[in-house]
Amino acid sequence: MNWFEGRLAAYDIETTGTDTENDRIVTAAVSIVGGGEESESRTWLVDPGVEIPEEATAVHGITTEKARAEGQNAADAVSEITQALAMLVAEDIPIVAFNARFDLTILDREARRHGIEPLIEVVGGPESLLVVDPYVLEKQINKFRKGGRTLGILCEDYGIPLTDAHAADADALAAARLAWKLGRINAELGAYDLPTLHEDQIIWADEQGRSLQEYFERQGRTEKVQTVWPLVPFAA
């Protein structure tokens, strides 16, 4: 069986912002799909313990008031999400996340913030992670495509339904469908075994980041591009 035909653990979060070191999880979803079995899904609404900025609410629809009234304690939610993903990795079910670097780094920092053992340590180190990132995959097999590479744009381009963008469960499922589609339409990609695919994505993400950094420098832009994948190591 090809990797994309087996079970996939789709993971997505919505947050208070885009700063991986300081922003917090507001919603999360882990959906186990594929492999000819019924799907299993779990979602979390989290009280992040801080104000949710209006610009973040405009994206995912969760206000500070709603999170405080209905959300789960952040430490409990982060622990549950971490354990759910760790159990799946232990079963050799890959975590599928679009732009995994963001979602996994945020979860890592949240765990450390609340005194919870981070996923990277629960699974036994970086070499034990198993991640499929359709953002990295699509950029590798279609290096010269023009236009943006948001999840919404790629879903539209590849004919994948995404009816509730920026809801964690909808985005997670769309990421899994996109990964499946990319594996199915590209024979070389589809033929990978999962551990090798994970290792090659580390290389591809580094190359993609360095290429973008060089482009920014040619344009006179000062942004620094992160090249480490699938999560940014914690600097104590």
Image: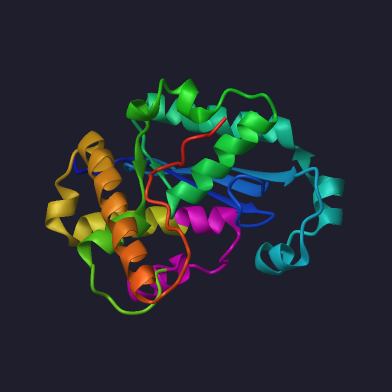
Q: Which residue is drawn at 17% across and 43% down?
A: 192
The verdict on residue 213 being magenta is no
Can you give x and y, in whole percent of width and height, for residue 59 in the image? 66, 67
Can residue 203 be seen here? The reply is yes
**Closer to the camera, 100 or 213?**
213
Q: In which quarter of the image is residue 219?
A: bottom left
Left or right of 137, for residue 33: right
65 relative position to 79: left or right: right
Residue at (36, 58) in percent of width and height: 135
**206 versus 163 height, above or below:** above
Task: Residue lying at the far bottom in this picture: please name it.
Answer: 146
Residue 208 higher or lower than 230, as above or below = below
**Lateral position of residue 151 relative to residue 188, left or right:** right
Residue 52's x, y, as percent?
Answer: 77, 56
Figure label count: 0
- Read off the magenta span: 150-173
Displayed quadrant of residue 83: top right
Residue 30 shown left or right of residue 19 in the figure: left
Q: Which residue is drawn at 76% across and 61% down?
A: 53
Whether residue 159 is visible: no
When asked about the image quadrant of residue 82, the answer is top right
- Of the pair 203 and 215, the residue shown nearer to us: 215
The C terminus is located in which quarter? top right
Q: Which residue corresponds to the image point at 87% horizontal and 47% vertical from the top-left?
A: 69
Q: Quadrant of the N terminus?
A: top left
Q: Pinpoint residue 149: horizontal percent, then vertical percent.
A: 39, 69
State the image coordinates of residue 176 (x, y, percent, origin top left): 39, 52
How is this picture coloured? rainbow
